[in-house]
Image (cartoon, helix red, strand yellow):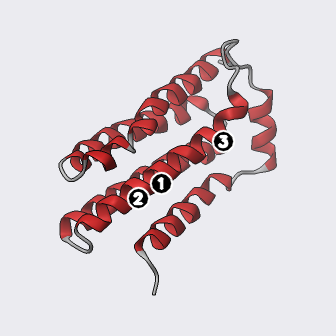
C-alpha cells in the first residue's frame, strides 16, 4: 500500500521534472544573458529550489494527514499542484520564449498563488503554513532577479 508521503513526494518529483523540458539553444541563450552584479548566489539556486520543494511536499503531507480525502483537503492539494506547476513553468516559459520578462510574470503569479495557498493552509495547520514560508521568501527574490536580468538585456 502506498503511503500518502510517497504519493505526494512522487507527484512533486514528477512535476518538478517539467522544468527540464528545455532546448539546448535556449540554454545557450540564457547563458549569454548579462546578470546583475549582485547575483553571486546563482550556483545555490538548485539547492534553494530543492529545499523549497521538500518543504512544500512536507506541508502538503501535513495537510493531507489532517483530513485525508476530504473535499477541503483535495481543494488544497489542487492548489499545491497548481503552485508547483506555475513554479516549474518559469524555466520553460522564460527559455522557450527567450524572454525573462515572461519568467518574471510567471514568478509573480506563483507568488500570489503561494500567498493564497498559505492563507488557506494556515487555517488548517500552522506548521504546514510555516513550511511554505521559504517559498514566500524566495519567490520575490527570484522574480526580482528575473526582472533585473530582463532589464539588463533589453
Name the residue at the top extreme: 37
Mark 3 closeness class: few <14, some 14–19, many ≥20 residues within 10 Å: few
Q: Which mark is residue 85?
A: 1
Q: Does residue 51 appear left or right of residue 66 in this picture? A: right
The mark that comes first in sequence, 2 or 3, is: 3
Observer-nearest residue: 29 or 53? 53
- Contact check, label 1 and label 3, Cβ < 8 Å: no
The quarter of the picture where the C terminus appears is top right
Residue 7, percent across and down?
Answer: 47, 72
Residue at 79%, 32% (x, y): give it: 31
Residue 118, percent across and down?
Answer: 29, 43
The mark that comes first in sequence, 1 or 3, is: 3
Query: Is residue 105 in view?
Result: no
Q: CA distance from mark 2 to mark 3?
A: 20 Å
Residue at 51%, 52% (x, y): give it: 54
Name the residue at the front extreme: 127
Mark 1 closeness class: few <14, some 14–19, many ≥20 residues within 10 Å: some
Q: CA distance from mark 1 to mark 3?
A: 17 Å
Residue labelled with disc 3? 46
Mark 1 element type: helix
Q: Does residue 92 appear left or right of residue 128 in this picture? A: right
Q: Is residue 139 above or below residue 59?
A: above
Mark 3 element type: helix
Amino acid at each position: 500500500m502506498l503511503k500518502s508521503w510517497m504519493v505526494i513526494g512522487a507527484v512533486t518529483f514528477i512535476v518538478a521534472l517539467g522544468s527540464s523540458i528545455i532546448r539546448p539553444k535556449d540554454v545557450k541563450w540564457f547563458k549569454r544573458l548579462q546578470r546583475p552584479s549582485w547575483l553571486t548566489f546563482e550556483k545555490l539556486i538548485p539547492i534553494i529550489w530543492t529545499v523549497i520543494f521538500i518543504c512544500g511536499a512536507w506541508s502538503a503531507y501535513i495537510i493531507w494527514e489532517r483530513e485525508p480525502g476530504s473535499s477541503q483537503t483535495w481543494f488544497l492539494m489542487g492548489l499545491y499542484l497548481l503552485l508547483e506547476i506555475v513554479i516549474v513553468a518559469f524555466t520553460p516559459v522564460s527559455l522557450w520564449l527567450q524572454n525573462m520578462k515572461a519568467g518574471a510574470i510567471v514568478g509573480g503569479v506563483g507568488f500570489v498563488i503561494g500567498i493564497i495557498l498559505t492563507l488557506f493552509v494556515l487555517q488548517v495547520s500552522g506548521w504546514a503554513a510555516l513550511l511554505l514560508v521559504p517559498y514566500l521568501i524566495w519567490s520575490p527574490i527570484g522574480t526580482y532577479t528575473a526582472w533585473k536580468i530582463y532589464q539588463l538585456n533589453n
